[in-house]
Image (cartoon, rainbow, N blue to C red):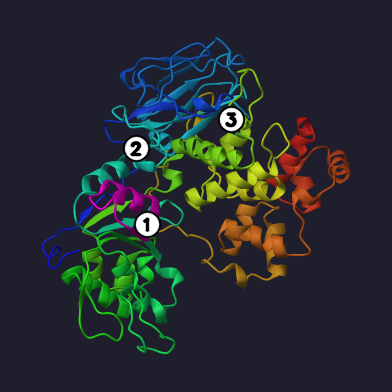
Amino acid sequence: MRAGSFADESTIGLKKRNTSEPVARLVPALTIVSHPLAHRVGERLLLDGVMAGRQEAVSRNAPDFMRPDAVLGAPLADPFLSRKPVVFSQGVAGGVRLTPGDGIKVTLAGEVLRTEWEFSPEELAVGVALELAERVVVLLHWADPSANSAVDALGMVGTSVGIQNVRHHIEQVADLNVPVLVRGETGSGKELIAQAIHRQSARRDKVFISVNLGAIPKELAAAELFGATRGAFTGAVKDREGFFRAAHDGTLFLDEVGEAPPEVQVMLLRVLETGEIYPVGERTPVKVDVRLIAATDAQLEQQIQEGRFKAPLLHRLAGYEIRVPPLRERREDIGLLFHHFAREELEAIGEAWRLKPEDSSTEPWLPAPLASRLVRFGWPGNIRQLRNMTRQLIIGSRGHSRLRLDPRLEKELEGAMLPRPGRSLSQPAPAASSEPKPPHEPKGPPRRRASEVSEPELLAALRESAWDLKAAADRLGIPRSSIYDLIDKSPNIRTAGDLTIEEITRCFQECSGDLDAMAQRLEVSKRALGRRIKELGLESGVS
């Protein structure tokens, strides 16, 4: 960081792609999320002929799936998949139509498809998880046919359009001596991007220091960053170097920069403009040469309006801006990321062989329904949450031939799940309303903190919503994830996982398999109860 080097820098932003309107160069594709042979995960099939009006047939023996950076590929080749194909063709308004036929069993969000289904362009932008013969899971989505980078290029796992854009912008800015602002949700991998920029820069052989400003007490932030002289403040019993001087000639990564106190913001602005720092208690400036990369999940523009963040500092930090897509915008990467983390965990417990089955007819270690649920989950905690769940799954399944969900993970996966996409062509499309919608539709009760909800109020909302947790959360005005925490803390509310087999069986018989009646009688989540019933083989009578 040299004096005056940022005076004329303009802010260059990586703008968010409108996921509901795929750009012209994207084509439909199928990416393998789960396969009995784990090394097949991440391979894809471009359905480029579909948008030209041709049909694309997918079966056990054809066509070939391949990684974006590969020359040769292979068909799905699972012996339990039929030779009779599933057919993809062009749908209305730029969507994709799926015709299951009488060959491969296709399951969509727990429902076996028996008729043609239509998926809109918007649903392809989100991604559609399809289970094939309860063995293989593929994601139908938009893909860039020109992409040819390795699945782990620059140390980031994935092949999605979003991660390709991030790699491109890293390569564009890495060798330039400009500050970079990385913006993205918590857990989305912002520090990984900072490390990749450093490794691609001329400073790659120098130090990389990572600092989380949110973890430093505000009264110590200035001394920690810029150093301090002995006696500068109470407790300063010796000179302190500070992170900026420690990172001299290298790269300093400031995470959660939106948490910087006002006095630190002034000092950051000075070092960005002049390349000089003033250690606390020192009147003589110190020159430093540091490449600064900052990251935040905060809305800095809103903080500026509220007077909590300085606009000039944002402009200086964002010499180049990179947006990290959340995991829900790159669902085709979930299978690759899961297996990447799984490999690390399995190696740690000495079970890496589970990802290297010798027989293609073996039972999948990652069950297809579980893989589908992982893809359809919203991942509010992004990659960090996926990594933690992968570890929990593997440790909790030690000694078993397949991964198993414990009740806690079962409950966690219930929240933020995508609804079933598409529509059956055996039913008429919903008619468009001729009446204009009001400009502002009512949004229900105002949002509240979960701590404001009393147990009687929680219980009343659950009963009034027939134990539909999403409806109850909406009624209370709290996030759906919060209602699980409230249920966990309540000594008087049970979950479906707390019910005994005898209790479920008896209630099933007395209610003649009526799931609504069972949920109200047992006072548990209807959705979770339905899964317990299926696990017990009682689902045949459930409506």
Q: Name the residue tied to disc 3.
A: 355
Residue at point 28%, 80% (across, down): 279
Q: Amino acid at mark 2?
A: Val
Q: Where does the image place residue 151, in percent across and percent down from the top left?
A: 40, 34
Q: Earlier in the sequence, mark 1 or mark 3?
A: 3
Q: Is residue 512 left or right of residue 393?
A: right
Q: What segment carries the magenta color?
A: 191-209
Closer-to-camera residue (150/447): 150
Please identify the quarter of the rendering in which residue 36 is found: top right
Residue at point 57%, 58% (across, down): 474
Q: Secondary structure at mark 1?
A: loop
Q: Earlier in the sequence, mark 1 or mark 2?
A: 2
Label of residue 439 in the image:
1
Residue at point 55%, 41% (across, down): 344
Label of residue 161 in the image:
2
Mark 1 against mark 2, which lies toward the viewer?
A: 2
Residue at point 38%, 89% (across, down): 233
Residue 188 in magenta stretch: no
Q: Secondary structure at mark 3?
A: helix
Q: Is residue 521 left or right of residue 39?
A: right
Q: Amino acid at mark 3?
A: Leu
Mark 1 against mark 3, which lies toward the viewer?
A: 3
Q: Are marks 2 and 3 in contact (CB under 8 Å)?
A: no
Mark 3 surroundings within 10 Å by alpha-carbon count, few (fewer than 14), some (14 through 19), many (20 or more): some
